[in-house]
Amino acid sequence: MPPIVRTLLTRGVPLLALYLVVLGLIGAGIIDAYWMATLALICVNIVLAVSLNLITGFTGQFSLGHAGFMAIGAYATAIISNAVAGPAGFLGGLLAGGVLAALVGFLIGLPTLRLRGDYLAIATLGMAEIIRVVFVNLDSVTNGAAGLTVTQNMDWNWFFVLTVGSVILIRNYLRSRQGRDAIAVREDEIAAESIGVDTTRAKVMSFTIGAFFGGLGGGMYASYFYFIKPDLFGFLKSIDILVIVVLGGLGSLSGSIIAAILLALISTLLQGFTEIRMILYALLLVVIMIFRPEGLMGSRELSLNVFSRLGRRRPALATAQAAPGASEAQGKGDER
Amino acid sequence: MDQLAQQLINGLSLGSIYALIALGYTMVYGIIQLINFAHGDVYMVGAYVGFASMAILGLGVFESLALAMVTCMILGVVIERVAYKPLRNSTRIAVLITAIGVSLLLEYVMLYFVGAAVRSYPPLPDYFNAQFAVGGVVISAKSLIIIGVSVALMIGLQFIVQKTRIGKAMRAVSQDADAARLMGINVDNTISFTFALGSALAGAAGVLVGIYYNTINPLMGIMPGLKAFVAAVFGGIGLIPGALIGGYFIGVTETLVSGYFSSLLQDAVVFAILILVLIFKPAGLLGKNVREKV
Amino acid sequence: MSDILAVEGLTRNFGGLAAVSNVNLRLGTGELVGLIGPNGAGKTTVFNLLTGVYPPSAGTITFTRQDRGPVSIGGRRPYAICRAGVGRTFQNIRLFKDLTVLDNVVIALQQNRRYPLLSSFLRLPPFAKAEAEIHAESLELLRIMGLDAKAEELARNLPYGDQRHLEIARALATKPTLLLLDEPAAGMNPNETAQLTRLIARLRDEFALTILLIEHDMSLVMKICERIYVLDHGVVIASGTPAEVRANPKVIEAYLGEEA
């Protein structure tokens, strides 16, 4: 069986099933407007968390400004899709939002990514605050602090395509030359540089790509929830996204996805108890860090491939045939 | 010219408050390399304690100041012991995230109990509202008291750090915690003491800001906390004189920006300064660059 | 025999302290040279200067590859120096501990095998082709180092000796012509050291390397090094063949002085 067919069968079929089931539930009215909003939030949060995980979990660069990228994407999508009706404006807006966010990420990342972890965190936090203040002050375009109404363009089809597409693209990136360079930077920057990894380039690339998808997530948010204002994209939003990433596990894409679903459900159930929700959030953060700092999944991945074992690090296709004994060595605790 | 002098006086008052908060950031960073995000919220708690002490207990301003300092001191030590100490050997990101968690916890627990509404600070004794005209510049007693109290606290801090045994221990631990431990210094207690000092100063700053702005709310700690951090970075994080210079610089800059341009821009300017400092002189004004040992 | 590395007047100050001062080194192509000296003599600092971890305070470092001609590498970024053809290992092992053995080598090896970002995102044919080659070549390198059976283990779970081997494999994967080994035998027992000694000699021939190594284990140094530089307090106090160095009174004094 050629690999592409196998991939389609093992990964495509479950995804298609998911798509159809949800479509059916929406058609049957079981997923009503209320739950659809939760579903939308889950999709947006998955895109945001996975992209932040790329920056923080995989590349090891601590960013506290993801909401800034989200804001850029949201406003770009809002303004363009309000000006140009139909899918052209909407998709053009999403793309422009992503590209603009990536551009800002690149410009901010280039000088600041030289900084050590916590300095970078502060620089990105500062960046997000500046972006927010700029949107408040750009009255003529953004309607300032009062906010902006956006044409609602997102539906389940788009959510499915954009969310799954984003996750696949980021996953492909991480399992490529460029992605491995980024992971090497996280593991040991000095060692990475000593074996020829251009660490600045690797960091800026991950940061820029993460910013792109952060912008896309913002655009998705704006196009579904149809009202945006600068305060939605403040420091707390960045923390929200960070909580998802940390809860799921820094360095685990499936962890981010699981945590995004879990937290959206909790948050929906606790709607109307805002303070309690935030107190629980805060406690969760502290308790996770003290008792399970690696998050739900650590850096393990859960595969959609139902035939592969749970939590395996990665399929070792090339190695299994090439090296006798390597296949047993994948198992845990194989010490001789 | 008069207007400039007026703005400078306001800037110095605000800068004093930032400097007090920045001192706590910088001492904690110096000793355990942690950006203590909860520090801004300790300052918020200080403001509320001062409020409660004046409005409910009916204590005077300076008694309330002392009470706020003691309460925050205890709070700071509790936070350190409960949330940070178990993570002494964890990654820096883990501790930083914990600090963010503690920060949110303080904010929303406070929000839960006192509500989101902004409160006005209780009326102050008359002498606070006295005003002196020097040339065309009006100086309020309030500003002078804020500056005076801050400077007195800073001198006290300087005394503790430079002249006392525990101050020496603090400096030793921030140089090299392992070596200090080998020399018989109780590192854990020294760290707790650092939190105690820093938090007490933040508590004082909380009461002073209540006096300065006259309003308090549960989320008031976020922005000043971040700005005080910017101040600490500006001066060179880990360095006490750096925090003072940074605090006054940020306070004055902010007042000038809101006085001459727009108060909406003041936050953006402060963060732009931060980013510029980080790019061009990441070790801060007084700091030295250090590289990881290979 | 032409020089592959020429170091002149290399100096590095930390604060007021000269960790390395006015060091001159020459390595001929294909030579195996030792750099020895008491603890704190500045040996690792020399390595760090050669590989760009610190910029030199003064002095020049010229690296020559037959096919490219001489280049000055002093003060360039570490990755650029590596790409020029200088590989290294670390005294305190710096593997990517949470990655597999294979990935440790793959990351080094892929630096010579580029394909565009778009291929990575969309898994286009250039991606598949390059990845297959990178993996095959990495496994081959692991086989040479005797680590192929452990390719999928996490680097942190390897026994200590294997970790040292893996670091050498990773350095070799960058296709160096000059290899710097920082105490490769540290922490090994005499038996392992003897094996390592043979391996280093073999690698030099098989990969046409020039090797400069820091080592405390005199049995290894005296056996395989053709020439030795002795560093003390940041200064080269002696150089020559193992026999010459062993007989040099300054060297004896430096070592005995340390023990006394």
Image (cartoon, grey):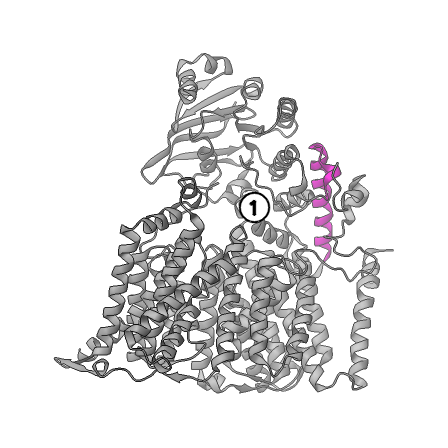
Q: Give the range drawn in magenta.
A: C124-152
Q: Is residue A13 visible?
A: yes
Residue B199 at what x, y percent from top left? 39, 64
Task: Please name whichever residue, B191 or A49, is drawn nearer the observer in this view of the structure.
Answer: B191
Which residue is under mark 1?
Answer: A192
Q: Can residue C71 be seen in this view?
A: no
Residue name at image x 29 percent, y 55 percent = B160
Residue B186 at what x, y percent from top left? 42, 47
Give the number of callouts.
Answer: 1
Residue at the extreme right of the image, as rendered = A1
- What secondary structure is marked by label 1? helix
Circle 1: residue type: Ala
Q: Is residue A264 above or below residue B30?
A: below
Image quadrant in which the N terminus of chain B is located: bottom left
> Does residue A229 appear left or right of residue A54 in this picture?
left
Q: In this view, does A91 lie above or below B228?
A: below
Q: Quadrant of residue C57?
A: top left
Task: Please name whichever residue, A6 or A239, is drawn nearer the observer in this view of the structure.
Answer: A239
* Residue C138 lies in the magenta-colored region: yes
Q: The residue marked by circle 1 belongs to what chain? A: A
* Residue B259 lies in the magenta-colored region: no
Residue A240 at what x, y percent from top left? 57, 71
> Does residue A268 appear left or right of residue C34 in this picture?
right
At label 1, counting other C-alpha atoms closer than 10 Å, the crowd grade (few under 14, some 14-19, many 20 or more) is many
Q: In this view, does C245 lie above or below B9?
A: above
Residue at the extreme left of the image, as rendered = B135
Residue C252 at what x, y percent from top left? 43, 16
Q: Quadrant of residue C172?
A: top right
Residue name at image x 27 percent, y 60 percent = B156
Q: Report the magenta stretch's main SS.
A: helix
